[in-house]
Image (spheres, rainbow, N blue to C red):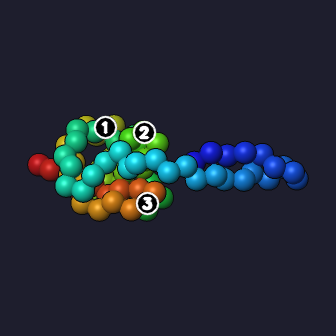
């Protein structure tokens, strides 16, 4: 996504088609960076948000991607 200022001080958003950096059922080792508004742990992979329920900031966990949407993915902690 690219932001560009247009007349009147507003921004125009141009969506760039980039491939999703994660795939369904992929397992990755990650570190949670902060909390999402709903209380889930959140991290970014190449600008793509991943939400992890029951995770806290600074947790280093292994997750499995269980759902992939256009702008975010949801991961589940693997014990």
**Which label belongs to residue 46?**
2
Which of the two discs, 3 and 1, sits closer to the camera? Answer: 3
Q: Which residue reaches farthest right?
A: 8
* 4 versus 51 height, above or below: above
User: How far from the left and from the top, in percent, is residue 67?
Assistant: 29, 62
Q: Which residue is mark 3?
A: 70
Q: In front: 41, or 19?
A: 19
Q: CA distance from mark 3 to mark 2?
A: 14 Å
**Which label belongs to residue 31?**
1
Q: Is residue 73 left or right of residue 64?
A: right
Element under disc 1: strand
Q: CA distance from mark 3 to mark 1?
A: 22 Å
Residue 40 falls in which quadrant of the image? bottom left
User: How far from the left and from the top, in percent, is residue 73?
Assistant: 35, 56
Q: Which residue reaches farthest left?
A: 79
- Seen at 35% across and 45% down, the residue is 21
């Amino acid at each position: 996504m690219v932001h560009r200022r247009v007349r009147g001080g507003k921004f125009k958003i141009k969506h760039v088609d980039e491939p999703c950096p994660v795939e369904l059922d992929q397992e990755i080792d990650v570190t949670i960076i902060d909390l999402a508004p709903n209380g889930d742990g959140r991290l970014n992979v190449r600008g793509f948000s991943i939400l992890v329920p029951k995770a806290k900031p600074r947790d280093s966990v292994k997750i499995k991607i269980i759902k992939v949407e256009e702008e975010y993915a949801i991961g589940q902690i693997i014990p």
